[in-house]
Image: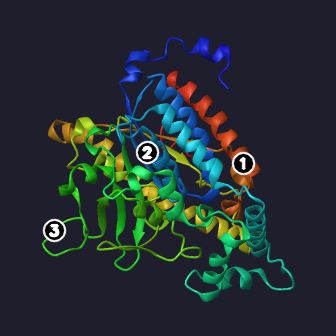
Amino acid sequence: MVTSEQTANSAQKKIDPRQQAKKKVAVACQGGGMHAAFEVGVLTKILEDVAAQKFELVGLSGTSAGALCALMVWYGLAHKDGNPGSVADASKKLNDFWDDFVAKKGAEKVLNFFTYRTLRAEEMEIPLLGINAPLIAGSFNPYGALYQSVAAWLPHLGVRQGYFDLHDLLAEVCPALAANPPTIDWQQLKTRVLIGASEVVNGFETVFDSDVNKDPQKTNKGMQPNHTIDFWRQRLPLTLSGVAASGTLPIFREAEHIDGDGDYWDGLYSQNPPIREFFYSKAIPTDRPHELWIIRINPQQWPYVPKSNADVQDRENELMGNLSLNKDLDFLMMMNAWNQKYGGQFANDHPLVTMRTIKMKQTTADELRYSSKFDRSEAFMNKLRQEGETVARNWLDLWNLNQVPEYPADVA
């Protein structure tokens, strides 16, 4: 926490609140299963400072579970069905969603316990019920008859449809986006949202972008006839199917099919989370964020060379979640360098952007495992959410004192 001594020593460095309030900020949320509960706490505190007009929240992005966080905040802020939206609505929508996303009923708690313990046993190479855990986990192919039979029986066992059916859950919590046509007032949106996914068949890096809903001419379907740019990446309108696509891990869900737009897996394989579109060369410079804040839930560094199966699996997943993001951030750093080197029209078209990282405490990150990304217990979620609130409050207080470091120094 910020001490009184730190505050006194930093009095001369503190930026005029009126100047800070003019800053436009975009917040990007990494995917990482239930570890995203940390992001819930961070976003809750960020919204408190948005309400206090300490800065302007102009963008949100996310992949997988991070996409769910970004969507809930965006939806609460969005003008829809005659409701202008508000920061209070966004905070409530975010926290209510995650309160319902955890295992609440008895059958859900049993299912969560079995799923998490099976994955944990697989990590530790411990036989479960006399059977090797990898055989158990591997048998649940979402395209297979066994998986389909289990899913069909879950409601009869007392498991809520929304607990295991992402489509049902999203339609319930975002009815204005589920409506046909959606009853979102796209032209009055003040906050943009980007959702990352991976098109499986053609290999397109895909972003579902609320800006495309505002202006359909911004749609880019990748490698299509008469296209001369952006062959291997797409920008499509924001839909609930796109959000479901972002959270489609192939070991748990069939590829998300979107008519006319392909079949999708988790955005982990492409952008985690998407950020490039905030600074796209055709964007109006005045619409771009001044600062980009990454909520990182996949540790950049590892304390030793992974050797056990559990450590290798954990580190593989973290690297997949970080490397594409780092490349995009490094590219933005290069653009900043070109801005300062060349100036002129280039600098006008590509304004400087400050990048910063908000991350878990190192002790927490070191304790988490790949298997814990699937632990939907309420106690685990609340623990990470509380840490997110604590970390974010301290981080935001330091940011207001102009004492928060920039990327890449703040990642390690």
Can residue 119 be spotted in the picture?
yes
Question: Would residue 88 appear left or right of 178 to someone viewing this image?
Answer: right
Query: Which label's residue is closer to the chain start, 3 or 2?
Result: 2
Instruction: Give neighbour class at mark 1: few <14, some 14-19, many 20+ (Cα, 10 Å).
Output: few
Observer-side mark, 1 or 2, equals 2
Observer-side mark, 3 or 2, equals 2
What type is the residue that disc 3 sits on?
Thr
Residue beneath disc 3: 228
In whole angstroms, how far apart are the C-alphas of marks 3 and 2?
A: 34 Å
Residue beneath disc 2: 75
Instruction: Give neighbour class at mark 2: few <14, some 14-19, many 20+ (Cα, 10 Å).
Output: many
Closer to us: 286 or 50: 50
Give percent across and percent down for residue 170. Answer: 49, 57
- The quarter of the rendered structure image containing the N terminus is top right
What type is the residue that disc 1 sits on?
Thr
Give percent across and percent down for residue 32. Answer: 59, 58
Give the structural element (helix, strand or loop) at label 2: helix
Instruction: Give neighbour class at mark 3: few <14, some 14-19, many 20+ (Cα, 10 Å).
Output: few
285 in relation to 176, above or below: above
In whole angstroms, how far apart are the C-alphas of marks 3 and 1?
A: 46 Å
Q: Which mark is residue 294?
A: none
Give the structural element (helix, strand or loop) at label 1: helix
Give the structural element (helix, strand or loop) at label 3: loop
Query: Which label's residue is closer to the chain start, 1 or 2?
Result: 2
Give percent across and percent down for residue 351. Answer: 27, 37
Q: Which mark is residue 364?
A: 1
Can residue 410 be spotted in the picture?
no
Closer to us: 291 or 265: 265
